[in-house]
Image (spheres, helix red, strand yellow):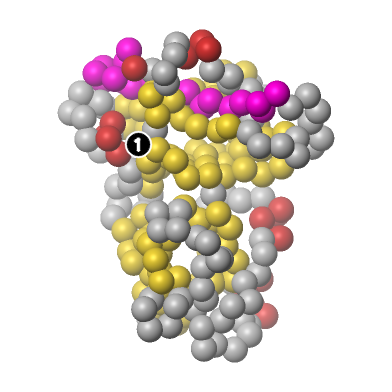
Amino acid sequence: MRSLPVTLALLLLTLLTVACGKDDVADDSYTHYLYDVMTYVGSDEATGCAQFELVGRDVSGSTMLTADVAAPEGTKPLQRMLVRYYYASPADHRNINVYGMTKMITDSLRVGQAALSNYAMHQVKMRSAWRTGDFINLHCEVEHTGKARTLMLLIDDATRNQDTVHCYLHHDLRGADTVYYWRNCYASFNVGNVWKRTECKTMRIHVNDATTGDRCYDFDRK
C-alpha cells in the first residue's frame, strides 16, 4: 500500500541501521508499507529517535509521529523527508517503524532579485505535484551532471496580489556542459505566506517539462 505515487527506483532507499532499542525489521517491510513526505521536527529526548510531522493532503490536518530509528546524522529540524514506514501496530498511529528515509530539497517560495526572464528554467521530467498544508511537493526527474545545481520556486511578483498567483520552477545547471542520465528528484516548498493572503485563490506552478513543454499545476486555496 502506498500513499504517494513513487517509482520502483525508490525501493532502493537506504535502509537505516541505527535502531532505538528494536530488533531487525521484519521481512514484510518490503511488502507492507507507506511512502509519505514528512517534516523532521527533532529527536525524542529519551531515546534519540526521530520525530516527524505528517501533514495530510490539501488541508486535512497533521499528525505527530515518533520513529523507531534516529534521523541521519546532521539532519536539522524542518527538513522535509521522504519516508518509507508503517505503523508500529494497527491501533497505534503515533509510533512508526521506519524502513528508509531520504532528504528532499527543502525551501520556501522566493522572490527573484531580477526579472523572471533572467532565470534559467531548464527542463525536468515531471511525475507528480501535490499539496500538503502549506507545502507544494514535486516529484520529477532531472539530468545528472555530477555538479551542484539550483532548484527553487520563484513567485511572479506582479501577480502577488491577484486571485491567481503565478510561480515558476527555476532550474539552473550552473554551467554544467555534460549531462548523463535522468534521476529522481523530490522537492518541497513552503508557500504558506501566499496561502495566508486573502487575495490568493489559486496558485499556478509553471514547469518546463521535457515531455510537454510549459506545464501548469493549479492549487486552490481552501
Question: Which image quadrant: the N terminus?
Answer: bottom right
Residues in magenta, as a range:
158-175
The residue at 50%/60% (across/down) is: 75
Asked whether 18 or 210 is in front, the reply is: 18
The percent coordinates of residue 139 (x first, y second) are 57, 42
Whether residue 176 appears in this view of the structure is: yes
The single residue placed furthest to the left in the displayed view is 198
Seen in the picture, residue 136 relative to 171 is either above or below; the reply is below
Name the side, left or right, on which 205 lies relative to 10: left
Residue at disc 1, secondary structure: loop
Asked whether 149 or 81 is in front, the reply is: 149
Question: Which image quadrant: the C terminus?
Answer: top left
Whether residue 3 appears in this view of the structure is: no
Q: Residues within 10 Å of mark 1 (few under 14, many from 20)?
A: many
Seen in the picture, residue 142 relative to 66 is either above or below; the reply is above
The percent coordinates of residue 174 (x first, y second) are 65, 26
Is 172 inside the magenta-drawn segment? yes
Name the side, left or right, on which 193 lies relative to 177: left
The residue at 46%/76% (across/down) is: 49
Instruction: Indicate the quadrant where residue 165 lies.
Output: top left
The percent coordinates of residue 161 (x first, y second) are 24, 18
Identified by mark 1, the residue type is Val
The residue at 26%/27% (across/down) is: 201
Instruction: Indicate the quadrant where residue 214 lies.
Output: top right
Q: Badge 1 is on which residue?
A: 191
